[in-house]
Amino acid sequence: MISLLFALMTIAIILAWRDRWRLSYAVFTVALVLSIYWLDYHATSPLTIKL
């Protein structure tokens, strides 16, 4: 999942360099939504710590 986020951010940067701003914003928005979902998934998952 993390590699997908890095790939999407890289694609957004490349699209911005090539003056494809609308598509770059769309890819960046998808990456941002996925990263917020991933953070929420890890922040709310229970920890299984056995002592």
Image (tube, rainbow, N blue to C red):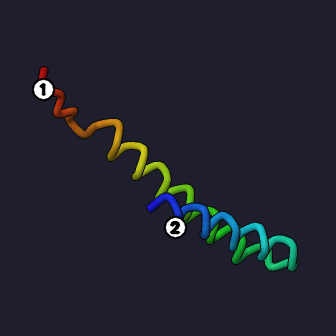
Residue 30 in the image: x percent, y percent?
A: 54, 65
Relative image position of residue 6 (x, y in whole percent): 60, 62
User: What element does badge 1 sit on?
Assistant: loop
Looking at the image, is 42 positioned above or below residue 34?
A: above
- Camera-side residue of 18 and 7: 7
Check disc 2 and report the residue beneath it: 4
Q: Residues within 10 Å of mark 2 (few under 14, many from 20)?
A: few
Instruction: Tell which residue pokes out farthest to the front in this image.
Output: 51
| Residue 4: x %, y % from top left | 51, 67
Q: Residues within 10 Å of mark 1 (few under 14, many from 20)?
A: few
Question: Mark 1 highlights which residue?
Answer: 50
Residue type of the residue flagged with mark 2: Leu
Identify which residue is drawn at 69% across, 73% down.
11
Quadrant for the C terminus in the image:
top left
Where is 40 relative to 1, above or below? Answer: above
Count of numbered circles on the image = 2
From the viewer's perspective, is residue 20 above or below residue 10? below
* Residue 22 marker: none
Image: 40 above or below 20: above
Image quarter of residue 9: bottom right
Task: Please report whichever mark, 2 or 1, sits nearer to the chain's N-terminal start.
Answer: 2
- Left or right: residue 44 versus residue 18 is left
Left of 25 or right of it: where is 35?
left
Q: Disc 1 marks which amino acid?
A: Lys
